[in-house]
């Protein structure tokens, strides 16, 4: 079961983990569609991948906008005749807020970014995944789904717990169509996401590895390798699972 001719959409893929996942899937032989909301950055990301021999396209849409998702995913599916892999990489902390001060707008923004996006993109893709080869969806959850997150990150944890549940629910729903659904749960990964604390409080950033069994922060490539495995034929009997990619961080030391 070759990856040649297979099509993968990676949301939030113009930088960080998403870009490395797109690169890895591209190296595996997929045509990768990078999603983002900054078109100029998306164009540069596609150029960077093409320079490495990857077949890549850019699709600019906001994953929290239902109509935009439906239009873009349909266009991709119609163009390629199918979709084989969806990587729901887009998401984020969205900021921090204690519940007492939390605005409804903030609550809805974080839930939309992390949970609505998975629902919108997955739902739009299902008709095309049914035409795919070893079709599957890969979502991103977090340790925060289990421990409810750090100070002010409670609604982030809540949204990621939703992703954990919708991963299993989608897996149950789509098994009859042979579509697998799994999730990865990245630990602390060294990406531009942490650039501010890395530059302003390097000692705090350096201390994070002390809570990780393997004694180092993760890299985007660490996550990309697991996504590559889940997307491929070696994982063809794995569904409804979440793989921790955190060097043992979830257990604490």
Image (tube, rainbow, N blue to C red):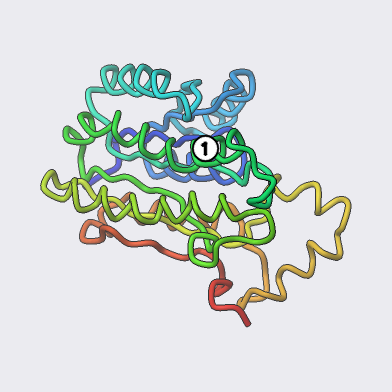
User: As drawn, is 199 to the left or to the right of 15?
Assistant: right
Q: Which residue shows up at 67% across the image and 69% down it?
A: 216
Q: Residue furthest bottom?
A: 253
Q: Which residue shows up at 54% across the image and 32% down it?
A: 49
Reply above or below: 231 against 118: below
Q: Would residue 134 be seen by someone viewing this image from the given angle?
A: yes
- Occupied quadrant, residue 2: top left
Q: How many marks?
A: 1
Q: Which residue shows up at 28% across the image and 23% down it?
A: 77
- Occupied quadrant, residue 137: top left
Q: Nearer the viewer, residue 244 or 33?
A: 244
Reply above or below: 128 against 178: above
Q: Residue furthest front?
A: 100
Which residue is under mark 1?
113
Image coordinates for residue 173, horizontal then vertical, percent: 19, 47
Q: Would residue 5 be seen by someone viewing this image from the given angle?
A: no
Image coordinates for residue 32, horizontal then vertical, percent: 41, 32
Q: Quadrant of the C terminus?
A: bottom right
SS for dot 1: helix
Q: Residue furthest left?
A: 176
Q: Residues within 10 Å of mark 1 (few under 14, many from 20)?
A: many
Image coordinates for residue 249, horizontal then vertical, percent: 58, 72
Q: Which residue shows up at 11% across the image and 48% down it?
A: 176
């Amino acid at each position: 079961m070759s990856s040649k001719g297979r099509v993968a959409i990676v949301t939030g893929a113009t930088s960080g983990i998403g870009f490395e996942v797109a690169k890895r899937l591209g190296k595996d032989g997929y045509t990768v569609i990078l999603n983002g909301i900054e078109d100029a950055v998306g164009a540069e990301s596609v150029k960077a991948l093409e320079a490495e021999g990857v077949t890549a396209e850019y699709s600019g849409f906001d994953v929290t906008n239902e109509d935009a998702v439906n239009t873009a995913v349909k266009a991709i599916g119609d163009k390629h005749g199918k979709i084989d892999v969806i990587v729901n990489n887009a998401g984020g902390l969205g900021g921090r807020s204690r519940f007492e001060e939390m605005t409804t707008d903030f609550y809805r923004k974080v839930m939309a970014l992390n949970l609505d996006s998975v629902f919108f993109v997955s739902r739009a893709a299902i008709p095309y995944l049914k035409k795919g080869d070893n079709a599957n969806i890969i979502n991103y959850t977090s340790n925060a789904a289990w421990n409810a997150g750090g100070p002010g990150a409670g609604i982030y944890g809540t949204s990621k717990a939703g992703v954990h549940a919708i991963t299993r629910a989608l897996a149950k729903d789509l098994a009859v169509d042979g579509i697998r659904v799994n999730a990865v749960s990245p630990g602390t990964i060294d990406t531009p996401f942490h650039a501010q604390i890395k530059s302003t409080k390097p000692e705090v950033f350096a201390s994070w590895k002390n809570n990780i069994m393997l004694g180092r922060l993760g890299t985007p490539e660490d996550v990309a390798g697991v996504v590559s495995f889940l997307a491929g034929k070696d994982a063809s009997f794995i569904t409804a699972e979440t793989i921790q990619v955190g060097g043992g961080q979830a257990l604490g030391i």
